[in-house]
Amino acid sequence: DTGVSQDPRHKITKRGQNVTFRCDPISEHNRLYWYRQTLGQGPEFLTYFQNEAQLEKSRLLSDRFSAERPKGSFSTLEIQRTEQGDSAMYLCASSYLTGSETQYFGPGTRLLVL
Amino acid sequence: ELKVEQNPLFLSMQEGKNYTIYCNYSTTSDRLYWYRQDPGKSLESLFVLLSNGAVKQEGRLMASLDTKARLSTLHITAAVHDLSATYFCAVDNVAGNTGKLIFGQGTTLQVKP
């Protein structure tokens, strides 16, 4: 078991550009979550998938954000027309649907929008 | 809306001392999690507390849950420098069984030699 992986680990972009992040969950985990963390704060929920279905999106997620999880495996998070306020650490987590629901987090993608 | 509050937000302590971090949450939940985060790193799962009265211990850390008081504590015994990190509690939004976690603000622990 290699854990949750994310790519890229760091991304610097100019305002207005589009960016895409990838998350590979722990194999056989059927739930996948995206969170955003800004400096000095706890992670904030963005969206989650159960298998390939996106079941909830946070009000924080504007129309510029879209996430997919084709075939219930890896997931991508795309941000269109980035803004400086999008600068944050984007964390992916996965879990297996059991009573404990422990979520295992990936290393995160740190985004800086100039 | 479920809210999670931790205190203190910052804790500086000497090695060998004991201290407790508190985590209060606003609505009913039976699942509470503690995570550790080192600077620039991701979150490491420490404890999962699933029922009222649950107590778990790992090394110098012990976590407990009182669902009636909506309170969890993380107790540090005889702190060592390696425990310096930010600790987050998180509560599962049980309604709807989404598994969505609501995190506290975090408690940054600095253990001085």
Image (spheres, helix red, strand yellow):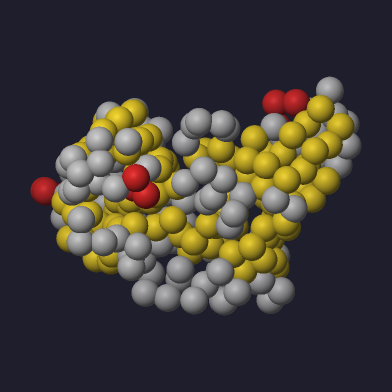
Q: Residue at the spot x=67%, y=66% of the render?
A: B24
Name the quadrant containing residue A6. Answer: top left
Q: Is residue A46 visible?
A: yes
In percent of width and height, residue A48 lies at 29, 57
Q: Specify whether residue A74 is in view.
A: no
Pick the front one: A66 or B92: A66
Q: Position of residue A71 (x, y in %)?
A: 11, 48
Q: Residue B82: x and y, percent? A: 70, 26
As drawn, A35 above or below B13: below
Residue at image point 72% right, 56% down? B7
Closest to the observer, B24 or B75: B24
Residue visible at 52% across and 51% down in the picture: A42
Number of dots carrying numbers = 0
In the image, is B78 to the left or to the right of A6? right
> Against A15, is B89 above or below?
below
Quadrant containing the C terminus of chain A in the rendered view: top left
**Residue placed furthest toward the top:** B113
Image coords of residue A99 (percent x, y): 44, 61
Residue ID at (54%, 50%): A41
Q: Is residue A75 left or right of residue B111?
A: left
Look at the image and tell me in which quarter the N terminus of chain A lies.
top left
